[in-house]
C-alpha cells in the first residue's frame, strides 16, 4: 500500500508536468511553422520583384496584396479584430493574472491553418505583426499562443529592440534576453514583445 501511495504521488506530480511540456512543444511547432511560411513568402516576394531588399520590393506599399498573394486566407476580418482574434479583454500576461493590452493593429486575417495575424500599414521597417497561432481559441496567453514578431528590411524576422533600426536584425542574444525580461515576462510591463525573441535564443524551445 505504501508503494502504491508513492507511485500515486509521483504520478500526480509527473503527469501535469508532462502535459505542460507537451503543450509548450505544440505551441512552438505551430509558431515555427508560421515563421517558416513567412520567411519563404518574403524571399519569394523579393525575388519576384527582382529587388535587393524588401523596401525596394515595395512591401511597405503592397503589404495587403502580399498576404493575399502568398497565403491562403480563410477569413478576412478587415479592420475589426473579431472573430479573427478573441474579444477584447481575453488575453492575459504570462506572469500575471491581469488582462493584457489589446491589439492595436488595423487589419486582421486568419489563415487556413488557423493562425490569425494582425498588421498595420507601416511607413518604414520594421513591420510589426501580432500573431495568434490558434486564432481565437485559448489559452489566449501572451507568450504561449500570442506573439509579436517584426519583419526587417533585410528579410529577417525577429523580435524588437528600440536600439535597432529597420535593417538591424538579427538581434543579439543579449538584446532578445533583455526584451524578454522587460517585456512579455515582466509582471508589470504589459508588453507583448520579448517571448518570440526568447524562443529564438533557446533554439525553438519554450523554456519559460
Image: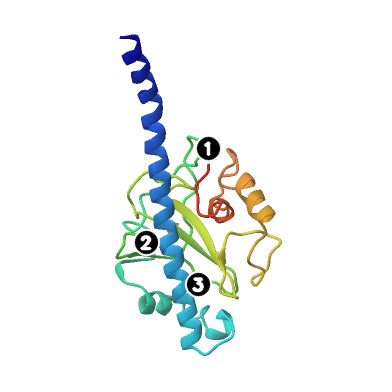
Foreground tag (1 vs 2)? 1
Q: Is residue 82 above or below residue 170?
A: above
Q: Which marked residue is nearer to the observer: mark 2 or mark 3? A: 3
Badge 2 vs badge 3, beta-carbon distance below 8 Å = no
What residue is disc 1 on?
95
Q: Residues within 10 Å of mark 1 (few under 14, many from 20)?
A: some
**Mark 1 vs mark 2, CA separation in Å:** 28 Å
Element class at badge 3: loop
Asked whether 150 or 206 is in front, the reply is: 206
Q: Nearer the viewer, residue 115 or 170?
A: 170
Q: Nearer the viewer, residue 125 or 10?
A: 10
Q: Give percent across and percent down for residue 154.
A: 60, 75
- Labels 3 and 1 touching (C-beta < 8 A): no
**Front disc: 3 or 1:** 1
Mark 1 or mark 2: name the one nearer the start of the chain: 2
Residue placed at 37% from the left, 60% from the top?
Answer: 116
Q: Which residue is mark 3?
A: 121
Identify the residue position indicated by label 2 in the image: 80
Q: Work out whether residue 135 can be spotted.
A: yes
Q: Quadrant of the N terminus?
A: top left
Distance CA(mark 2)–CA(mark 3): 15 Å
Q: Quadrant of residue 29?
A: bottom left
Tell me what residue is drawn at x 60 percent, y 44 percent: 189
Which element is circle 1 on?
Answer: loop
Does residue 16 sit above or below 181 in this rendering? Answer: above
Density class for disc 3 (Cα within 10 Å; few <14, some 14-19, many ≥20) is some
The tag earlier along the polypeptide, 3 or 1, is: 1
Residue, x 40% and y 46% (percent of image)?
A: 140
Q: How is the image coloured?
A: rainbow
Q: Which mark is residue 124?
A: none
Give the image location of residue 27, x and y in percent: 41, 50
Amino acid at each position: 500500500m505504501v508503494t502504491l501511495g508513492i507511485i500515486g504521488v509521483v504520478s500526480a506530480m509527473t503527469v501535469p508536468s508532462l502535459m505542460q511540456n507537451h503543450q509548450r512543444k505544440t505551441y512552438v511547432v505551430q509558431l515555427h511553422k508560421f515563421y517558416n511560411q513567412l520567411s519563404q513568402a518574403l524571399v519569394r516576394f523579393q525575388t519576384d520583384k527582382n529587388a535587393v531588399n524588401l523596401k525596394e520590393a515595395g512591401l511597405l506599399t503592397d503589404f495587403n496584396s502580399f498576404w493575399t498573394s502568398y497565403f491562403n486566407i480563410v477569413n478576412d476580418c478587415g479592420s475589426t479584430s473579431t472573430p479573427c482574434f478573441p474579444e477584447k479583454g481575453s488575453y492575459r500576461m504570462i506572469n500575471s493574472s491581469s488582462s493584457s493590452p489589446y491589439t492595436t493593429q488595423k487589419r486582421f486575417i486568419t489563415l487556413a491553418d488557423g493562425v490569425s495575424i494582425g498588421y498595420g500599414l507601416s511607413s518604414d521597417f520594421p513591420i510589426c505583426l501580432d500573431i495568434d497561432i490558434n486564432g481565437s481559441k485559448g489559452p489566449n496567453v501572451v507568450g504561449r499562443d500570442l506573439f509579436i514578431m517584426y519583419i526587417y528590411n533585410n528579410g529577417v524576422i525577429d523580435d524588437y529592440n528600440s536600439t535597432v533600426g529597420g535593417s538591424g536584425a538579427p538581434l543579439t542574444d543579449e538584446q532578445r534576453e533583455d526584451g524578454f525580461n522587460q517585456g512579455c515576462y515582466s509582471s508589470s510591463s504589459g508588453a507583448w514583445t520579448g517571448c518570440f525573441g526568447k524562443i529564438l535564443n533557446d533554439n525553438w524551445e519554450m523554456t519559460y
